[in-house]
Amino acid sequence: MDALVLKISSLPIVLPFQSCNILEVKLPKTKLTLTRWSADWRNATQYYEQAANAYRFCKKYEKAKVAFEKASKGQEMLASYPLMLKLKVKPWDAAKHMESAAALAVELSIWNEVADFYRRASELYNECGRSQPASDALAKGARALEDAQPDVAVAMYTDACSLLEEDGKENMVSDLYRAITSVYIKLEKYTDAATFLLRWAVASNKCNALHSQCKAYLSAIIVYLYAHDFKQAEKCYNDCCQIDTFLSSDQSHCASKLLSAYRDADVEEVKRVAKSGTISNLDHMIIRLARKLPTGELIAMEVNSLEHGEALDEDDLT
């Protein structure tokens, strides 16, 4: 019979693949005492890594999680040794082990640890000068937390975006901004969703993704309309038209038609524009909102916009 052999404290433990329930591992001690003046992190880390893999194989996730935490700590300690510092050894393995611990926390639904572990993994990757894995770790945590802790998920997605943008990798943030927008729409926080769509547009501009930029602007306008905020939708459109790329785009023309239909209180025209090819090429979450337009009385929305605006002075011709 094949067996898994695990050596802990010089004592081999033979684990048949069909007998995982007998696995009990005594993990090594690394605390200093009166009789133990130094910690053998090299051997201890190796044992923790073996224990973590064995526990995970046997689906003892809680123990595997703890072992991966310890293995990560061990790799951090090894990377901090004077010789390792001189050789500029980075805590890459520590980050990988912490990410494994985070994945197990997801399996166990320990949501606070999910956030903490993925954030720590991100920090360790960042210490290695690797912004993409650092961002990916945060994104993994955010995806796991979308239902359980959506506000924490948004914060992690946002930090993931910042890591890439600070490293000049705006071309890699689209999926993150899409995820943030989706979470905010699920939470019915439409103003926040529109804000991040506008941020997405700015990021797209920096990496010369002009088509994505225009789509993000149109999406923001649609979100404002869905939220019954015609005034803000119109202001957003006017601001976006200051950008030549958007002004001459199909997305700008579509937004103009949509806003004109709102001003004319033409429900059928709103529905027709909402089914246009330009809107059909947006993200599905935005298409779903557009297909539901108008979401209220158009006359009421127009009046609401005027009520919150400045009173019209007929003698003022400027």
Image (spheres, helix red, strand yellow):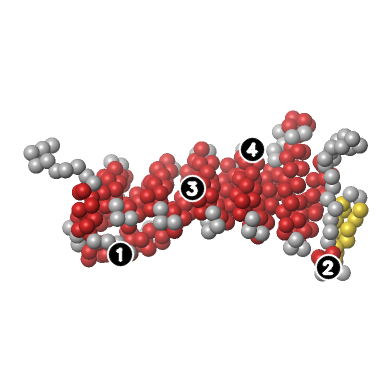
Quadrant (top left, top right, bottom left, bottom right) of the C terminus? top left
309 to the left or right of 22: left
Find residue 288 and report its horizontal and vertical position in percent.
Answer: 37, 63
Of 68 and 191, nearer the camera is 191
Of 130 and 103, nearer the camera is 103
Find residue 164 and report its horizontal and vertical position in percent.
Answer: 52, 42
Q: Mark 4, residues whose alpha carbon is within 10 Å: few (<14), some, or many (≥20)?
A: some
Disc 2 marks a residue whose amino acid type is Ser
Tell me the tag on residue 127.
4
Picture quadrant of residue 109: bottom right
Tell me the tag on residue 275.
1
- Tell me the residue that label 2 is attached to: 19
Disc 3 marks a residue whose amino acid type is Val
Q: Earlier in the sequence, mark 1 or mark 2?
A: 2
The residue depicted at 61 percent of the width and 51 percent of the height is 112
Marks 1/2: CA distance?
Answer: 60 Å
Above or below for 82 versus 18: above
Q: Earlier in the sequence, mark 2 or mark 3?
A: 2
